[in-house]
Image (cartoon, helix red, strand yellow):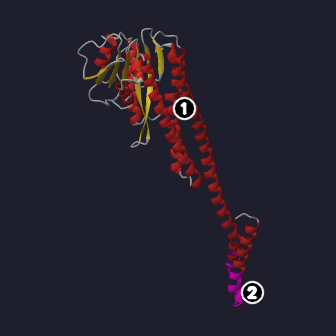
């Protein structure tokens, strides 16, 4: 059976199809144009000093890092492929790495290339206007004395880290590039807790509506929340394996004293994944509760209709019986025949209602 593709699915399909037929490592971006121009921020720091420089294009080598300094390069926007390619050439990045950077549908991953470590994570954001979660791909490249961050668009998520670099006695200034990479991963994962709270609040709101008065909109909200939870799990679940590799990887780029920090992140992501698993079970249970509530409501309606029908069955019989045109019926000639018949029908209905109440059927 053929599936009808709507406009959004068609648009997504067309973005993916740009890579069809091209050889591996072909640099084609599938990102929407979220930023008009790619912006580059270069931050150099050590224990004694720091320098922040904003540039729109790379006009000189950015590999020449001062002795003892750490260079943090932030690239916002991946629509200008030439800039990504230039950075890749300068830092000798593999073409498959650049391909993954430009592919915003890439799942979270970890790869150790010896001279550098490549990490892909998803930043999650709650869009209040669209009432759904939005994801943004963040690529992190960790070298010996540099960290490159490539984002789909400019954001303020890493501003607290920049503020900590400005502080002379901040821990970031005293540590190496591996600690900077840790702080970047940590702040992305901390943002997952906010997403987790939003999902928990949404579950509570739907549970309240399930108890009070479940409607068809409630079912729509449950399915929408279930779909969002699945998308969240798809973006968060692989991060657990990434952090596990970071704390166990024997790489010259990660010092031994960093393992304790990555273990702390691993604990965070484990708790988040565990909560998402619980939320999935709760949402599945809400579907059962909704169906049970609708079934009970339908049973109540059918019970009322059945009682009304049962009461009117003998009344309909009497009305039909005396509706026959026979002149020899004694009640027809009596002046009190009609009132007595009406009284009899009322008494029958009253007695049946009392009987139903005694049986606790109503």
CA separation in Å, label 2 and label 1: 84 Å
> In the image, residue 182 lies at what x, y percent?
46, 22
User: For mark 1, what is the residue?
Assistant: 272
Q: Nearer the viewer, residue 230 or 51?
A: 51
**Farthest residue, direction bottom:** 335
> 56 or 24, which is in the foreground?
56
| Quadrant, the C terminus | bottom right
Q: Is residue 197 above or below residue 25?
A: below
Q: Quadrant of residue 29?
A: top left
Q: Position of residue 233 (x, y in %)?
A: 52, 31
Q: Is residue 306 above or below residue 104?
A: below
SS at circle 2:
helix
The 10 Å Cα crowd at callout 1, few under 14, some 14 to 19, many 20 or more, is many
**In the image, is residue 105 above or below residue 216?**
above
Residue drawn where x is 41% and y is 43% of the image: 128
Left or right: where does residue 96 sit relative to residue 298? Answer: left
Chain-order first, disc 2 or disc 1: 1
Q: Secondary structure at mark 1?
A: helix
Can residue 100 be seen? no
**The residue stretch that appears in magenta:** 320-343
Report if residue 13 lies within the magenta region.
no
The verdict on residue 336 being magenta is: yes
Of residue 55 and residue 33, the one placed in the foreground of this image is 55
Percent position of residue 259, x then y: 53, 17
Q: Mark 2 and mark 1 in contact? Answer it, CB < 8 Å.
A: no
Q: Which residue is mark 2?
A: 330
**Mark identifier at residue 47:** none
In the image: residue 66, left or right of residue 258: left
Image coordinates for residue 209, horizontal then vertical, percent: 55, 51
Q: Who's the residue at 40% across and 42% down the image?
A: 130
Please tell me how crowded label 2 is: few (under 14), some (14-19), or many (20+) other residues with Cα within 10 Å.
few
């Amino acid at each position: 059976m053929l599936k009808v593709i709507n406009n959004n699915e068609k648009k997504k399909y067309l973005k993916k199809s740009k890579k069809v037929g091209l050889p591996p490592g072909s640099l084609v971006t599938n990102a929407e144009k979220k930023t008009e121009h790619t912006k580059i921020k270069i931050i150099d720091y050590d224990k004694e000093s720091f320098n922040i420089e904003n540039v729109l294009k790379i006009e000189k080598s950015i590999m020449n890092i001062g002795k003892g300094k750490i260079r943090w390069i932030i690239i916002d926007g991946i629509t200008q492929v030439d800039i990504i390619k230039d950075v890749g050439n300068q830092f000798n990045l593999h073409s498959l790495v650049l391909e993954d950077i430009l592919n915003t549908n890439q799942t979270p991953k970890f790869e150790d290339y010896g001279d550098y470590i490549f990490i892909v994570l998803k930043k999650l954001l709650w869009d209040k206007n669209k009432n759904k979660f939005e994801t943004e791909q963040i690529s992190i490249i960790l070298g010996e004395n540099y960290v490159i961050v490539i984002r789909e668009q400019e954001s303020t998520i890493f501003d607290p880290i920049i503020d900590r670099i400005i502080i002379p006695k901040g821990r970031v200034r005293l540590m190496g590039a591996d600690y900077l990479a840790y702080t970047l991963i940590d702040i992305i994962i901390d943002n997952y807790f906010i997403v987790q709270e939003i999902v928990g609040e949404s579950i509570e709101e739907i549970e309240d509506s399930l108890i009070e008065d479940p409607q068809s909109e409630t079912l729509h909200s449950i399915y929408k929340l279930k779909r969002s939870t699945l998308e969240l799990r798809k973006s968060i679940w692989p991060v657990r394996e990434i952090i596990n590799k970071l704390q166990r990887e024997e790489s010259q780029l990660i010092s031994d004293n960093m393992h304790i920090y990555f273990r702390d992140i691993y604990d965070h992501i484990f708790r988040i994944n565990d909560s998402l698993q619980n939320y999935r079970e709760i949402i599945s249970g809400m579907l059962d509760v909704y169906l049970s509530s609708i079934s009970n409501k339908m049973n109540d309606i059918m019970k009322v209709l059945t009682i009304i029908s049962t009461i009117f069955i003998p009344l309909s019989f009497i009305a039909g019986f005396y509706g026959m045109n026979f002149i020899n019926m004694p009640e027809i000639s009596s002046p009190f025949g009609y009132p007595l018949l009406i009284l009899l029908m009322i008494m029958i209905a009253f007695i049946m209602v009392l009987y139903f109440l005694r049986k606790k059927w109503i």
